[in-house]
Image (tube, coloured by chain):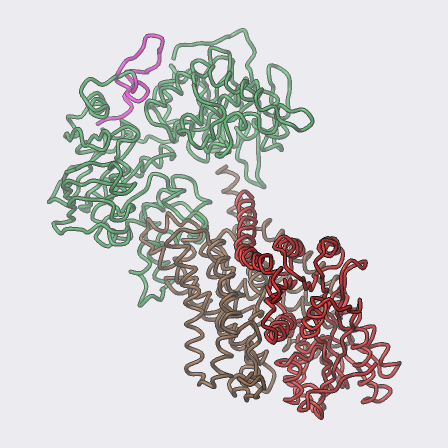
Chain colours: A brown, B green, C red
Amino acid sequence: MTASNDLQRNTKKHFRLSPAARAFLALALVLLLGFVFNAHGAFFKLGTHRDALRQSSVYGILACGMTLVIISGGIDLAVGSVVALVAVCSALMAIHWNWSPWIVVPLSLLIGATCGAVSGGITALLRVQPFIATLAMMVFARGLAKHVSGGTKISTAIEQADKTYRYAELPKWFRAIDSRVLWGQVSVVTVVCAACLLVAFIALARHVWGRQLYAIGANEEAARLSGVPVIPAKIAAYVASGVFAAIAGICQAAQETQGDPEAGAGYELVAIAMVVIGGTSLMGGRGGVCLTLLGVLIIGYLEKILSINAVPEATRLMLTGIIIVVAVVAQRQRSS
Amino acid sequence: MSDFVFPAVAPLVEMTGITKRFGSNVVLQDVSFNVRAGETHILAGENGAGKSTLIKILGGIHTDFEGTIRLQGREIQPRSPLHSNELGIAIIHQELSLIGPMSSADNMFLGRNKATAGWVHNRLQEQEAAKWLTQLGLDIDPRQPVEQFSIAVRQCIEIAKALSQQARVLIMDEPTSALQEPEVERLFQLVEQLKQQGCGIVYITHKMEEISRIADRITVLRDGKLLGTEAASELPASKLIRWMVGRELGEQFPRRDKQIGTPRLEIANFSVFPQGRSAAPTVRNASFTIGAGEIVGVGGLQGSGASDLFLGLFGAYGNRVSGNVKIDGSTVTIHSPRRVIEAGLALLTSDRKATGLVLRRSIVENIVLPSLSKLARKGWRRPAAEQRVAATMAEKLCLRAASLEMPVAELSGGNQQKVAIAKWLETKPRVLLLDEPTRGIDIGAKREIYELMHQLTRQGIALLLITSEMSELLALSDRVIVMHRGRIMADMPGNVATPDSVLAAAMGGHEADNSLFAGNDIQSTNAPDNESCATNEPVGGE
Amino acid sequence: MLRLHAIVHLLLVIVILAGCSQSEPAAKSAATAGEKPKSDAPAASKTFTIGMSQCNLGEPWRVQMNADIKAAAAQHPNLEVIFKDAQNDTLRQRSHIEEFVSAGVNLIIVSPKEAEPLTEPIANAFRGGIPVIVLDRAVRGDAFTCFIGANNVQIGRAAGKWIAEHIGNDAKIVELKGLMTSIPGQDRHNGFVEGLGGKGKVVFEADMKWLEPEARKEMDSALARFDDIDVVYAHNDPGAHGAYLAVQAAGREKKPLFVGIDALPQEGVAYVSQGILNATFQYPTGGQEAIDTALKILAGEKVPKTITLKSRIFTKENVAAGGAVIEN
């Protein structure tokens, strides 16, 4: 045991680099796919890449929070529903009631944080498995979104008491979120996603809390006996995930120009896939935001390449499934 | 151990000229080893000496090696663990390989179910299982999930499983590391029984007491090379240690000058209620005091409450404790480990893998984990400072690791324990609680930990120690506290305590049944059929 | 591995529990409601109970259908409608129909999720003497009282014709399809091709799964490949709206024509009023017609076996006037 282990340690440096390296390799392969199947040159247009990044942004924002939660040994299935809830609430406040963004954004983040605090509290304090606790929150938040919206989309067409419609102006800041900066080459949502990734990265790499999450994910009992405040740290991870989901929800509403109570269905699975394909372990205690960024790009570009080639839906699903399995199997070989 | 040898019979298993490489590294070089029917053959050596590799070759886990293996004269090539089992070789692993929620019958027949067309004959399996279990003197229901049994019983089930597979050679890898004294004794009786049935037993252990108790022959490995095989009677403990370590260790326990200062930790009427206050406490009204630089050993059998005393003091049971605890004269409110650590207490837990270390994370991360907030500035970590602290600690404790960034899981047991100690030293504790600090580590590393303990006492740290090795308890402690069912039964100076007096108190009175402790107590003689006890071999003690 | 198993099991349990807890109150209300007509049936003042089984309420169009039925029924105080939502679960819808039968409702309206598995339960109810109106999606055979539905092929054809009238011969068309595995998707596509009659060229087509964000993504890809696009035909209004947002974000000078289907008041019709879509074609819910037909059946009148609903077109010009009926 020890002898063989010691030997493997000698090649340790290689193994260290490997998660990131392998994720890079996967990304390179996906991009190569794009070079080969470039859809009559569409892949080489700047706009294609801008759109690929924009389309991955909402998922990417969710993946930030998901990374924190997964590293702490949990999972957050509620993020997709929280996107819908916040999309509906922010659309209601911004479009229907015409409130200032300085009120709408903090309130929206508060809604997300509350959802996270509840599911985090249920797991950490009541010791319910994260899967169950967040599943419950997923169902609950979806229901709340439908309740708040009355089952219809909250759009600029506002039904009045006499069944006629009045048309509200889309708030300027909604338009701003769906616009582009840096000589029109980068979508604002992409910038938001990058900022979220950066914040998550710094928190995880440099803040005491980040280190505590790794310890909790890898061995909760040892962490507790080392004086780590396990319960607050875990709840904070779910709160962070809820806040990121709220940011994603605002971006979703701004891009759709409406709050759709059905929005974000299945987004949690995409976010989890991005985190896991990057190389963060579902068992907790291993991984990081840089890996998640790679995962976001891999899945984002894969979708884009399939889309510009107008690949039929059936083929897309099959290809995506195959690629997820390949990526995860590669990850397991590395970690064992 | 008397020479219980069958000179005429060929060895049960004979391994000759075994060489095994991992890449360019030679981990076993031309090692020969044999096991005879009806003997207990101790395989000794420090961690990393190649014992495990040798066993894994025999067990079919490593299949590419040089050399030959003969089983009763016939050459064999174990291809897989299953194949090796079929050949009659069974390994009882350190970490038991039973499946907790399954019954002992299901575990015993896992992978070779008695079945017709896929339908399992449960009744038949249970009868068969019960037969083997009874043969080992185990009266349990074969339908009960194994996780409901103690580790000792599970070990017996594992042995029963091996026997049910017609195993002739049983390899036991540190089987007593998780056992309490009476269970150890039962295991030894079992070993004796198996010997008489003609099994050959390979036994790996770090405990000198066990070696002198059960060994027929001893083979010592060091750095992948064979140092020799001797009859146990030819190999006194001092020589054995010299062989294993490769240098003179001097005495097993280093000496130190006692300098006991003012009281560090004062406990009065301390009780622990792990199941909540409505349930019975596991520690009742404990009161004692430890001075600066003092080592107090806590003795007791399993369930004595010693571990719960530590966990309770440390805040692991939250506020489910009562009584008065003072550190350096100021009262400590016990609420969570976090608060208690701030007050100057540290706990080295008995199971470093489960509760002591975060195995998947690096050495640095583990060392700084309890002092993260202290090392950080306003919640933001300072990686450079953390590196510096960890490097200093590693140097101080002579930690042997290729890099401080490697996961703790990849270290040997002794080095893991050093990391676990290092992380607590970094919190600058005033009282250090040590629960089995030398469990599962080799003799050289043990010695280093003893020296470290002495060094800490010189700095004025008070040490509370739990150990299941009697010699360690007596040799290291300035005072010995003995617990029985949550109560402190005795509190005596180290030089007064004897194995007999400790055991008597641990049994809850003065008329202790010594035979229960014969395995541990090297001084006491025992039942006549038990010719163990290299009685006069001084294993420990100052 | 073991953990995964446990999780899968738990998930199953949860789903089952969720299913039970949701259907239970509905069953109770049906039972209590069901007692009423039995006691009242002999009485002269007729109070009728109608059971309405909706296959799911996840789509705004189906929410609208229920709202239409409710509004129509509200005009008749002697009608009581019990709504049930099968949440896209065929088996649940089947048991809803059976619950209606055992509760003894006077008439059942079903908007079935699938034809085959629901044919038999509907036929059983029908043969048991309860009139059944099948709404929107047909079932096999003729063991029901009346089918009310719109014709997606006709609607698609109307959209194709309208587009053909507004474009040149070599116009570039993007078709954002719902799901080509679904019958409405296929019908809206086939009718559209027929209606175009060879004018223009479909250069890009993709499934957008009836979802707006997906439609926007697919439109992004179309824009990346083609510099000028003349028409976007989407199989539903949110799809057309998503495509509009994509074009707007791309900052194209020339805006293509946007044509959608469904024309729900708060979606398609609103988009046309706001100048986002150029045209939308109504896919009527039939809620009003269902209640009208139900009243006739309950009064003992004869009704046709099949009623095909007329669609309406909404454009900038006629939206204020409530659109125009399309004559076939």
Q: Residue furthest right?
A: C198
* Residue at left offset 71%, top offset 62%: C132
Residue A117 x/y as whole percent: 40, 63
Report which quarter residue A164 is drawn in: bottom right
Residue in the foreground of this view, choosing between B191 and A54: A54
Residue A154 x/y as whole percent: 55, 78
Q: Magenta segment, which residues?
A: B516-542
* Residue at left offset 54%, top offset 36%: B26
Residue B457 x/y as whole percent: 20, 42
Instruction: Give the quadrant of the C terminus of chain B.
Output: top left
Q: Is residue A333 left or right of residue C308?
A: left
Q: How many marks?
A: 0
The correct choice, above or below, for B159 with respect to A55 in the image is above
Q: Residue furthest front?
A: C44
Residue in the foreground of this view, choosing between B14 and B176: B176
Considering the whole magenta stretch, tell me its main secondary structure. Answer: loop
Instruction: Give the quadrant of the N terminus of chain B.
Output: top left
Residue C65 x/y as whole percent: 65, 72
Report which quarter residue A309 is drawn in: bottom right
* Residue A276 visible in the current orientation: no
* Residue B379 visible in the current orientation: yes
Residue in the foreground of this view, choosing between A127 and B387: A127
Q: Is residue B312 left or right of residue A111?
A: left
Residue in the foreground of this view, choosing between A19 and A310: A310
Q: Is residue B517 magenta?
A: yes
Q: Is residue B401 magenta?
A: no
The correct choice, above or below, for B90 with respect to B360 in the image is above
